[in-house]
Amino acid sequence: MLDKLFRKTAIVAPDVFSSRLYDETTFYSPFLKDLSNCQSEAIIESPFITNRRLSELLPTIKRLKERSVRIVIVTKDPREHDKDYQREDAAKCLATLQKLGVSSSPFLQHPVSFRRSRDERSGVSRWAHL
């Protein structure tokens, strides 16, 4: 009986009950795919932001902004980085993002950090540990 009820009323995305673990080398492709599917909002959390990584994200971010998707980057304040080149790189990245209309917010604490994307159509969120 429940089987009939759920078949008629529940719509479940095929991957809702599956899970994968990604690392810093394997998460970008699925992350970009999920990010591309965002319809209204994308929140990206990462303590570090670099020009190298940002260059991979920029085409997707630009397409999202063209579709009026709200994007927020939650990251470490550039002044908190240990090395001068990291501070300069992070500040340049945030300036680039700001010019595109991307909001930024500082981490309050970040002992462990993740990147998150949410597929608005299926409601699936994916997190990638950095």
Image: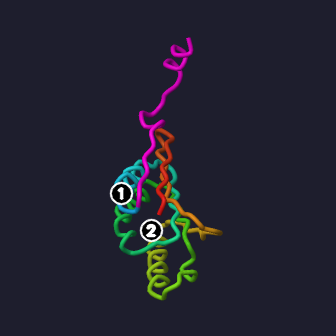
Nearer to us of marks 1 and 2 is 1
Q: Secondary structure at mark 2?
A: loop
Which contiguous range is marked in magenta? 1-23
Marks 1 and 2, how far apart at CA: 27 Å
For the residue pair 103 and 47, the one nearer the viewer reads as: 47
In the rendered view, would you say 65 is above or below 40? below
For the residue pair 22 and 58, the one nearer the viewer reads as: 22
Residue 16 in the image, given as x and y percentages of width and height = 47, 37
Q: Amino acid at mark 1?
A: Thr
Q: How is the image coloured?
A: rainbow
Q: Amino acid at mark 2?
A: Leu
Q: Secondary structure at mark 1?
A: loop
Residue 128 in the image, given as x and y percentages of width and height = 47, 56
Residue 14 in the image, given as x and y percentages of width and height = 42, 33
Could you tell me which residue is drawn at 35 percent across and 61 percent down? Answer: 25
Residue 2 in the image, given as x and y percentages of width and height = 56, 15
Residue 107 left/right relative to 89:
right
Numbered badge on residue 15:
none
Residue at the spot of label 1: 26
Residue at the spot of label 2: 100
